Image (cartoon, rainbow, N blue to C red):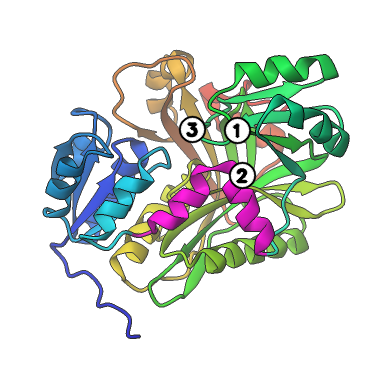
Amino acid sequence: MSTPAPLPPGAVLGIVGGGQLGRMSAIAAARLGYRAHILTSEPDGPAAQVAHAVTIGGYDDPDTLRRFATAVDVVTFEFENVSADGLELLAALRPVRPSGDILRISQDRVAEKTFLAGAGIPVAPWRAIGAPDDLPAARAGLGLPFILKTTRLGYDGKGQRRVHRDEDMRDAFDALAPHPLVAEGMVDFACEVSVMVARGLDGAAVTFDVTENRHRDGILDLSLAPARVPEAVSEQARAIALRVAAALDLVGLLGVEMFVDRDGRVLVNEIAPRPHNSGHWTMDACPVDQFAMHVRAVAGLPLPPAVRHSDAVMKNLVGPGDMALWPAILATPGLLPHHYGKQEARAGRKMGHVNVLFPAGALPGEFGVDAALGPLGGDCGLL
């Protein structure tokens, strides 16, 4: 079967979802000569502010979806909490990349872990929890503590409870919804890393450098590129990301989140078939960033090498506390700010991020990173 021709300049990229990932994807599409059309329920959301056109409506409404499909040439999505059934309807009208089948896998933690294990991808120990009666067996297999999570709709630390004692299990089960749940064993990890992998229509794939990630309150706080891990660990992580992309038959971009344990083993935690927060450093440290690579893959364009010209640190701006520092951030040399256009800075809400660049091979230690963050330093758990 021949590979479809790339989309010509002037074609319309349909993006399902109106958040900041859609915003940055739309900007990347414009740089490549494409127009972005956003399907969203937010008339003035981050993506709608920069798009060529916007369709307002539900992600599962057939009339809205048909109207959207007639106005675009190809469809992608910017977050997982959209309707897989809706994407299936769109796929009957326009190419959808990545596919709805991949979305269904990534939307459900049990389906995701089952798929990865079936593909021979190393994952952390886990058990499916359909009812309270399943908890004792999970506790026996995983030990204490373990994490109980919703299988769907969880993000940024939401939809999960840590179980420390046997008597906590039932309360944790009752507090989480929807059921079923998944129980995940605690990994004695040295660090958390991720890899962004792009794969084109022709099966060619590229990976960005392995990124080291630090979380706070369940939300990604800091990403460092390249990850400060042995080269053998980096090679292992990149190889796993490529295997996952091939197993999914991905067309588009995929974020693969992983644990590196104390023995140097790499275990996959989650996958996200879209641009990812931990890849935002690429916007300033790479000639072709994750958003441009995503658009290229979806549009059928060639994928250039995912190279890095600088080392980088990305710091998320979350809630009113970080946004109160916005004037100081703008006044600090070396900070490269990205604002998402959200009006209300609620607690736990991602409002933007800041990148800091260093010469390639010169990523500093903890004190140096903290100092380079200027007004944002001192609260990253670095020191």
Quadrant where the C terminus is found in the figure = top right
Amino acid type, callout 1 = Pro
x, y percent for residue 366 = 70, 35
Q: Tell me if mark 1 has few (under 14), some (14-19) or many (20+) residues whose alpha carbon lies within 10 angstroms of its own.
A: some
x, y percent for residue 351 = 40, 26
Instruction: From this view, report whether residue 92 is shown above or below residue 328.
Output: below
Magenta-tinted stretch: 97-119
Judging by the rendered image, the residue that carries numbered circle 2 is 110
Rounded to the nearest whole Å, what is the CA distance between mark 2 and mark 1? 9 Å
As for residue 105 lying within the magenta part, the answer is yes
As for residue 68 lying within the magenta part, the answer is no
Q: Tell me if mark 3 has few (under 14), some (14-19) or many (20+) residues whose alpha carbon lies within 10 angstroms of its own.
A: some
Rounded to the nearest whole Å, what is the CA distance between mark 3 and mark 1? 12 Å
Judging by the rendered image, the residue that carries numbered circle 1 is 180
SS state under label 1: loop
SS state under label 2: helix
Name the main secondary structure of what is drawn in magenta.
helix
Q: Tell me if mark 2 has few (under 14), some (14-19) or many (20+) residues whose alpha carbon lies within 10 angstroms of its own.
A: many
Q: Nearer the viewer, residue 327 or 204?
A: 204
CB atoms of marks 2 and 1 within 8 Å: yes
Q: Residue at coordinates 81% horizontally, 47% vertically from top-left?
A: 261
Question: Upstream in the sequence, badge 3 or badge 1?
Answer: 3
Judging by the rendered image, the residue that carries numbered circle 3 is 153
Rounded to the nearest whole Å, what is the CA distance between mark 3 and mark 2? 13 Å
x, y percent for residue 265 = 80, 55
